[in-house]
Amino acid sequence: MSAPLLEVRSLSRRYGKVVAVHDLSFAMERGQVTGFIGPNGAGKTTTMRIAATLDVPDLGDVIVDGMSVLVEPRAVRMRIGYMSDQFHPYPNLDVLEYLDFFARAYGLRGRKRLETVRSVASFCRLDGMADRPATGLSKGMGQRLHLAKTLLHDPLLLILDEPAAGLDPHARIEFRALLRELAAAGKGILISSHILPELGETCDSVVVLEKGRRVVAGSIAEIQKSVQREQAVQLRVLRDGEAAQRFLLVQPGVGDVVCDGERLRFSFLGEDAALGELLARAVAAGLPVVEFARIEANLEEIFLRTTRGNLQ
């Protein structure tokens, strides 16, 4: 097996009396999109800044493509693209000039630099904005320019801190599509966000932090299974939801029945076979069932079940 693209090894960072990160470890592979979530002050930005070589840990290390951020920071910088949660474009530069400035900073020269700048601008859908002042862009276009700057040196790993913050729904959809293209091209993406439903649609795995500590990490499917001891089920009948509610309340394994007209939601403690038997009994009892489906825990539910909302 190849080595992980990113390894966070027993990372700790303290600011005075505040422990921002404590003994944090996780890893991610190439082509993987990992959501980095937690309450405010959980240590997400601190961890990302250390991985981006912008801060140093008190203990532990971060390994990117086999290289330590402490031992080989320059080599690591050429393998990562860091997009901070704040975008401050330089004045008196248009979009292409802004990208060209950073392309030069990354050491790109001649025809390759010009081709890279235009290629990245095109990928980020900035073609029509080439001559616009970088400081005069909308929030959505500004985030695209921020991402384009991050991609100029073709990094293996993207570290994106709240990239969708402040974007309108249309801009978030477009930004999410760009991230999917990057992941499909083999980029590893570590992304933090408070917009959990959208993050759930983008990520393969998640790392949940609270008070600087890892609460849970793994694929979304694995975490759903571990936190969802009881199955959540939705039932819809053609008529008489109250009769369906009375039926459910006396069934073994059923709890927390909520009736909203002809739609009902309840928890069920049991395996799939027992759930199938419950459906058969409902039909045999004459309930006009038109929908019976298990509800998977989404990322918001995972977050609420695994954290306590503690701030630091």
Image (cartoon, rainbow, N blue to C red):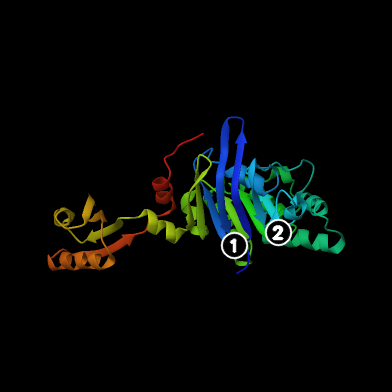
Q: In the rendered picture of this protein, how many numbered marks are placed on residues? A: 2
Whole-percent x, y for residue 84 in the image: 65, 45
Callout 1 amino acid: Glu
Name the quadrant containing residue 34: bottom right
Report the residue marked by disc 2.
Answer: 155
Q: Is residue 303 visible?
A: yes
Numbered mark located on residue 63 in the image: none
Left of 130 or right of it: where is 166?
A: left
Residue 139 location in percent, x, y?
Answer: 62, 45
Q: Distance between the residues labelled 2 and 1?
A: 14 Å
Pointer 2 or 1: first along the chain: 1
Residue situated in front as seen by the camera: 48 or 82: 48
Viewer-closest of 60 and 206 = 60
Q: In which quarter of the image is residue 27?
A: bottom right
Q: Position of 34 compared to 147: left or right?
A: left
Q: Which residue is drawn at 79% across and 42% down?
A: 92
Local SS, label 1 = loop
The foreground one among 108 and 72 is: 72
Quick one: quadrant of the N terminus? Answer: bottom right
Closer to the camera in the image, 38 or 260: 38
Which residue type carries mark 2?
Pro
> Residue shown at 13%/68% (left/top)?
284
- The residue under the point 68% across, 46% down is 137
The residue tagged 1 is 29
| Rendered location of residue 202, percent (x, y) | 52, 58
Residue density around tag 2, few if under 14, some if 14–19, many if 20 or more, within 10 Å: some
Q: Residue furthest right?
A: 110
Mark 2 or mark 1, which is nearer to you?
1
Q: Note whether 164 is above or below 153 in the view shown.
A: above
Which class describes the residues within 10 Å of circle 1: few (<14), some (14-19), or many (20+)? Answer: some
Label 2's element?
A: loop
Residue located at (54% from left, 47% from top): 193
